[in-house]
Every structure is written in structure tokens, then in C-alpha cells.
Image (cartoon, grey):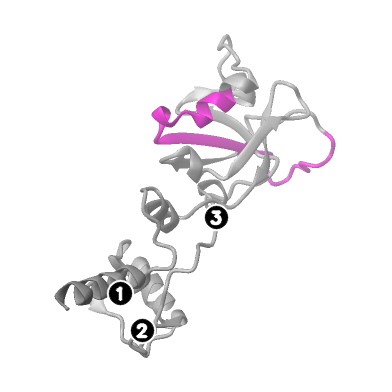
Amino acid sequence: ERKSSTGFNKVVLKGFDLTDGVAEIGGIFIGDHLVFMNGMPVGAGCLLMEGTPRPELKEVLNRLKDSTLYPMGLTFARPAKDTNRWNGASSIDIDTAETFCITANTPDQLGIEIGLGRDKDSIVVNNVFAVKGQYQEKLTSGESSYLGHAIESIDGQVVPSYTSASMVSQVIEKKWSDSGRVEILFCDDEGREWVRKLSKESSE
């Protein structure tokens, strides 16, 4: 929050928090096996389809990074619940494993790192991490930066001068939760003040 030149309270965009990636939201854990990519078997998934060429890790990584292949559906396998996944076994029983499917629209939404498992033919999740959220993607994708800009209105409703940053955050979260969309109008107060001064000087 900050005071404008007119003395009114303004809520400004200070920065962004990272959010859970598609993998974490979809319940993917470290140690899960990647078995299919857009229907193509990889790693332990090749055990289900005899004679299928087994893609190397480098090829799998390149496909995960290739934005032209998205939206991408990924299938992961996890040892059955009655199996101790940390018992030192080098492979997974793909026939009894639990499977989890996720879909990502872009590579940046995934939020996972993969590598070779203890069995050199398996590909597993090595790390799960937070990613940029949709707000951050939208507001940082162009040439202009919205950081430091005041929030003027939310879905056409002007933000009152008495509103706090926490109140604005709650309103945005509720509207997003209710409808899956929210329209935010930002204002560059410094730019607006510069225009006002320029206009005043030119009229004198």
C-alpha cells in the first residue's frame, strides 16, 4: 500500500508468489515413474508394450521442453500401496502399480525434474517445485511491467481508497474461485502524474 499524490491510499502490485505446478496439484510425488507421454510409452511404460523402442532420457527431456507438443498428457506409475517403495527394489511392477494422469498446457506449468531411476531403464521424478502462476505469466509476458502499478478496479468495480492490500487479495481470490476469471485494471500513477504536470505546463 502507498499514498498517492492526492493523499488517497493505493494498493499496488508489489510482486508475485510462486504456485504449485500441475504435477504437484495432480498428486505426483518424488520417486514416481513416468510411463507415458501423450500416449507414447517411456521408461517402465515400455514393459507394457513389447518391441516398443525405449526412448533415452535425453529424448524424453527434450520432448518435455518442446512447447509444440503441448497440451501434453503424462502418466505416472507408483508401486501399489502394499509395496514398500523404499525397500531398495530397482524396478516397479507395472501391472500392479497405481497410475496418475496429468495434463499441462505449457512446459513451465509442470514443476517437476526427472532423471534415471535405480533401474537404468526407468525414468522417475527427482524433484517437485513451485512454478509461476497464471497471474505472473500474464502480467510479465509483454514488454510492460505491472510491478508498482496501482489496482484501480476489479471486475469493473473501483477499489475504494480505504481498501487494504489484504482485502483486495481476498476479493481477487474469491472472484477467481467463483468464476475462474477476474479482470483487473491497473493504473500507472507516476505516469498519470507526469501527464498531468505536462498538461498543466503546456496550458500555462
The amino acid pointed to by label 1 is Glu
**Residue 54 image offset from top left, x and y in percent:** 60, 15
Percent coordinates x, y for residue 56 in the rendering: 63, 18
**Residue assigned mark 1:** 193
- Residue type, mark 3 in image: Asp
Q: Is residue 8 visible?
A: yes
Q: Nearer the viewer, residue 127 or 41?
A: 127
Q: Is residue 34 left or right of residue 202?
A: right
N-terminal of the pair, mark 2 or mark 3, is 2
Which residue matches tag 2? 5
Three-letter code, disc 2: Ser
Bounds of the magenta span? 60-88
Image coordinates of residue 81 in percent, x first then y, are 69, 46
- Can residue 77 be found in the magenta stretch? yes
Q: Residues within 10 Å of mark 3 (few under 14, many from 20)?
A: some
Compared with 6, 185 (above or below) is: above
- Measure how far apart labels 1 and 3 are at the Cα level: 38 Å
Quadrant in the picture for residue 169: bottom left
- Report the residue marked by disc 3: 20
